[in-house]
Amino acid sequence: MTDMKRRDFLKAGAAAVVVTSTCLCGLNGCSTFTKIGHTQEIKPEAITRKGNMLLVDLSREPLLGQVGGAGKIKNDLVPQGIIIAHTEQNIYQIASLLCTHRGVEVDYDHKKKRFECASLGSSAFTLNGGNIKGPAKKPLQKYEASVSGNILAIRI
């Protein structure tokens, strides 16, 4: 057995941590650890709040311009966070952003027409927030919305 210097030991240990972390993120997704999904945030300049209504100017937010697009809002206007999915022409589904299992963000899967937890548990929810599968036992909160011209109005 050869003698290893302290510096070499620390370098080898650090390398092992980097490799392990990379493998875990690559295999399982970093969302499990960061609790942040892949959905991009809606531009702050596209959002205003009037009383219990959140108004999103769709002409100022390309994330929601196409059917299948989605965006999230998590700021002082909506601290708990919401996810907005453009599911069909002029139809938007809005739900709470955080999975009811561990508080990891959910993402919208347009092909499957559902919200999915970005974590390992893979909880899935209907567009109305109902549970489909996974460890989550409670549904996502659903928000009512309407579209008038280029404005998406969400009752929060």
Image (cartoon, rainbow, N blue to C red):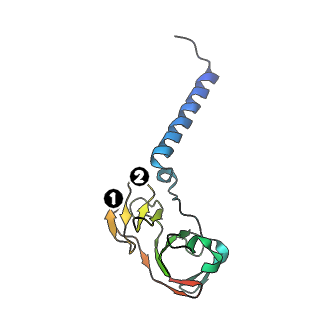
Secondary structure type for disc 1: loop
The residue closer to the viewer here, 87 or 20, is: 87
The residue closer to the viewer here, 124 or 74, is: 124
x then y, percent, for residue 57: 62, 81
Total marks shown come to 2
- Please give the residue where the numbered disc 1 appears in the rendered image: 134
| Residue 4 shown left or right of residue 132 in the figure | right
The residue closer to the viewer here, 13 or 130, is: 130
Q: Residue at x 33, y 59 (%)?
A: 134
x then y, percent, for residue 26: 50, 44
Residue 57 has which mark? Answer: none
Secondary structure type for disc 2: loop
Q: Crowdedness of circle 2 by 10 Å Cα count: few (<14), some, many (20+)?
A: some
Is residue 137 at all visible to an observer of this figure? no
Q: Are marks 1 and 2 in contact (CB under 8 Å)?
A: no
Above or below — where is 55 with respect to 132?
below
x then y, percent, for residue 48: 62, 81
